[in-house]
Image: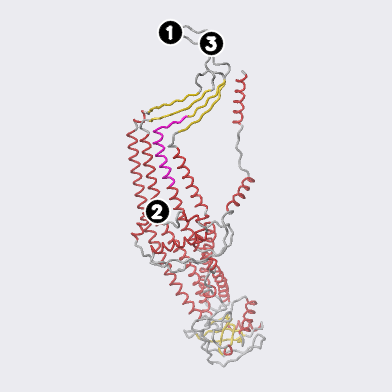
Amino acid sequence: MPARGVVTGVLTAITLAGCSVMTSAITPAEQEKLAQSDQELLFKHPPGLTGPLTLHEAMARALKFNLDLRLKRLEEVLAWNQEEVTRLDMLPRLTAAAGYSTRSPDNASVSQSLVTGMVSTEPTFSREAATGTADFTMSWNLLDFGVSYFQTRQEGNRRLIQTEQRRKTAHNLIKDVRFAFWKAAAAQWLEQEIGAIQKAADQAIEMARRVENEKLRSPVQALQFQLGLLEITRQLEKSRAELALAKEELATLIHLEPGTPFQLVDDSGTRFDPLELAAPVEELERWALISRPELRIEQYQARIEADETRKALARLFPGLEFDVAKSYDSSALLVYQHWAQAGARLSWNLLRTLTGSRQKDLSEGREKVIQMRRLVMHMAILGQTRIAYHEYRAASDSLHRLTEENDTRKRLQGHAANRGALGLDSQLSYVQTVASGALARVQQYEAFARYQSALGRLYATLGWDPLSEEGIEKEIPQLTRALRANDGQWQQRVFASRNPLPFIDANAQTPLPLESLIESNALSLEKKRPGAVKSFKTQATPTSNDGPQIKTPAGESASGVAATPEGKMSEGSGIPTGQPANRLRYAVQVVSTMDQAGADQLMNRLRAKGYPTRLHEEWNAEGRKINQVWLGPYERNEDALTAKRRYQDSENQPVFIKVIGN
């Protein structure tokens, strides 16, 4: 009874403890603490950037630190461990057991004679009430060995599938890094230029609105100009917003902490110069069929399905089990407390033999499915290779055409700049030409990013590994060199380029932009190239301290000073280089118009404010007279710049420096 009571109490306590288990929800405080811990863990080990970032260094950091790729590596290691565990199932089972038992009262019994039927009246027992046992057994089942053998091969193929999935993830990662890098580079190239263009376009739109309000030109033309410029600025803002996201995408891909500032460096050496495909598409298809991870995955999956069929067939056979054991019993009533035993047993599940035909049909069906899946993937890879091939050629042609178009726009912008001093129409057209050129450059950089994306997609379609298996363990500088060398090998195999890519140290390079687009291409209202002035006359106004007054006889020819053959202007002054300063005079052009009454009205308003105004007349190519309102002329460029700044500050309107002859 005492023992029974103890057992009952223990069972009752266990039952009550099991019923009392309750699961609580995660609290916001716990979630916040976990988020902080994860945040610290995320960016604890990856080293920060020490300088500007090149394309191949970005690829190296992505291969080294990207979380998706690291997850694939962990899954590959897990599959490897699973294979090792399954391999151990082929070994014999070694079992060691020990136990202790007691009972109350003793296991006493009487006996009855099988021959005479007489019952012994004296109870006896052959085992002590409390005994300890131990045994060590080795057993091996031939059927389990066969099943475990095929299971181990399946796990090995699953491990190889994880390896191919990691390769596929690496291919897609490199492709995404390439695209994001060049989009971010385009944003970095164009950020300042787009801002300058938008600011100048806003000034030009405001000027056009004033022209419209003062009726200095046709309202329809003024509105058309405003509408066109607003459309260009809208597209610029849209492109600027899209490009700005690329830097955050790149930071995520290379596992940089959000908000980390970094600069990009162009180490391609072939900006806007697309590589020419040299390998035929049939050769690319052959490479893809050899290297693509998806096709290898299907082949490994076919092995797994085949071994699954073999496992099912192996279970139809009898199972033969051998066992050897060494045992011990502490009962003092036993004559031999230690003993050894061995045995063999044959077992056969007869019902499984009845399903043999169905197992055969199932295996044949699996083989057909596997073959069809392999053919589907084979066809898909052929199609993807052709598509990637044509996408690359289309992206290359688009980049080439946009580059030619941009070069043409630059030349057109130069001619528009030379005509910018002829009148208001030419000035506003110049503003619109420059803004259109900026939009074209944005489209050119976007086309270059799409070209790089097509290049990365072609590499991923061919299934070429960015790096060898052992190369991933290298440090970032060595990894960067290896990636760049591998990239050069790809180019030599696929493209007409035979020159290997030299290694470029990012710390020795100038961050993008490598050329000053602001100085060479962007709109600057202070850098207008003067055109030829045909004739002019002036009207005297009251003397002003802003500069001396000059009266030139009507009809006198004054030759405008042209720019040098190189088209270079001196910084900030609008003076062509190489011209003697004592032969030049300067004026601030306020407006050009064909409306004589509007020009007179503007001059009267400016005179009332104390400005030294001049009315300059010249004729355009159609023979129509243009009236230009000037401030000045001035003997020195510094005086003209002072007057220009004074007018802009008071009138909030952009004006131009004119360079005229004596």
Q: What number is the disc on residue 353?
A: none
Q: Which element carries disc 3, helix, strand or loop?
A: loop
Using residue 475 as the reference point, say whether residue 33 is left or right of it.
right
Residue 74 location (% of width, % of height)? 50, 48
Split into 4 quadrants, where in the image is the C terminus?
A: bottom right
Q: Amino acid at mark 3?
A: Pro
| Residue labelled with disc 3 | 123
Q: Is residue 381 left or right of residue 660?
A: left
Residue type at numbered disc 2? Arg
Compare marks 1 and 2 and give the one earlier in the sequence. 1
Q: Give the alpha-carbon distance from disc 1 to disc 2, as whole Å.
A: 82 Å
The location of residue 424, given as percent across then percent down, is 53, 79
Front position in the image: 319 or 632: 319
Residue 292 marker: 2
Residue 641 lies, in percent from the top left, at 62, 81
Color theme of the render: secondary structure
Q: Which mark is residue 115?
A: 1
